Amino acid sequence: MIHAQYPALRPRRSRAHAWSRSLVAETVLSPADLIWPLFVTEGTNTREPIATMPGVERLSVDLLAAAAKEAAALGIPCLALFPNTAAADRSDDGAEALNPGNLMCRAVAAIKAGGANIGVLTDVALDPYTSHGHDGLLDAQHRIVNDASVDILVRQALNQARAGADIIAPSDMMDGRVGAIRAALEAEGFHDVQIMAYAAKYASAFYGPFRDAVGSGGYLKGDKKTYQMDFANSDEALREVALDLAEGADSVMVKPGLPYLDIVRRVKDRFEVPVFAYQVSGEYAMMQAAAAAGVLDRDKAMIETLTAFKRAGCAGVLTYFARDAARLLG
Ligand code: PBG
């Protein structure tokens, strides 16, 4: 309860100086809040620019250990990896996801061998490996079949855990996959491998640049609305989160980010677990484009948006700005 009135109470007093603003700040953003997504490609000493994501490059496996060390030195605690699988290795059933020598597994192994003190999060979903660009398997009528998809996603997760992944992050939105993955990890002795569930993942227009980055966009037929959530819904996000937690998720994610901070806040208030958000490719591209057009101060907008995620209740944020933000914050 506030009893005092103006002029006894002047909220501007505490904003009058930088020292005072920092003293009363309710939220602090630090590099330790950031997860840096990296795109991986075949080749040696290869950096491929991604046209729709200015400033982001796909890196060949041999460059990853250095990127991991750079991130760790900046205080970034975790990387998220996404492979741009060669066209020849994509198929209807996404079997390349199960190959112990696939790009993802080689990437994880290279980072681990490099010795950087940093976590590695791997994405579980079939879209970088399928010739149709969907996250699961299709039946003859081109419907995404749930349970058969879960079976292969479980094997994909085990493949990643064997390669050294620290956090398994299922982004596919099939029903029941978190429980099935947890059970399989336990059965193989991967008790300490975490699961960060993409729990409230919406069918969104903001994923377009990512699909260019992993090369799935050109293949994708139709949309992902039978498995990703309807952006009209909020209660449903709580149900998705409750299910994933009951199935054994260690943390949950809301995705996309900035247009969904209401969901972050509801999830944070309802469940006592770490909540993450993904500031996705379209959000990144939008801000880069605005900055390039001279209508936005990129660095200021970057720090403001990342702080907003924390204010909304996030434990951390997956963001393509991670390295730049960590440099600024450092
Ligand atoms: C796919 C996946 C997507 C993203 C992460 N994992 C795209 C999609 O669902 O089509 C999006 C990330 C981004 O846009 O930055 N499993």
Image (cartoon, helix red, strand yellow):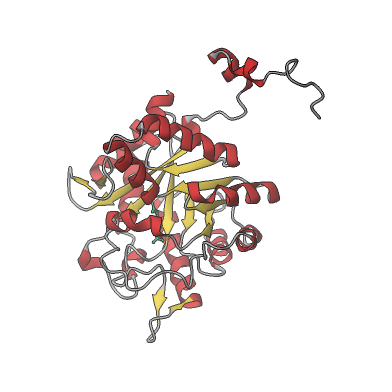
Q: Residue at x 46, y 70 (%)?
A: 225
| 20, 50: nearer the viewer | 20
Name the foreground residue: 171 vs 73: 171
Residue at 47% in and 52% down = 256
**x and y percentages locating residue 198 in the rendered image:** 51, 56
Q: Is residue 251 left or right of residue 98?
A: right
Which residue is depicted at the point 32% across and 64% down?
A: 99
Residue 37, percent from left and from top = 38, 45
* Residue farthest front in this picture: 7
The answer to whether residue 261 of the structure is visible from this angle is: yes
Lateral position of residue 25 relative to residue 100, left or right? right
Q: Whole-percent x and y of residue 308?
A: 53, 37
- Could one spot residue 72 in this view of the protein? no
Q: Quadrant of the C terminus?
A: top left
- Total numbered labels placed on residues in the image: 0
Q: Nearer the viewer, residue 189 or 13?
A: 13
- Looking at the image, which residue is at 64% across and 58% down? 238
With 187 as the anchor, is 290 left or right in this view? left
Find residue 298 and report its horizontal and vertical position in percent. Answer: 35, 33
Determine which quarter of the picture holds residue 224.
Answer: bottom left
Q: Quadrant of the N terminus?
A: top right
Instruction: Name the quarter showing ligand 1.
Output: bottom left
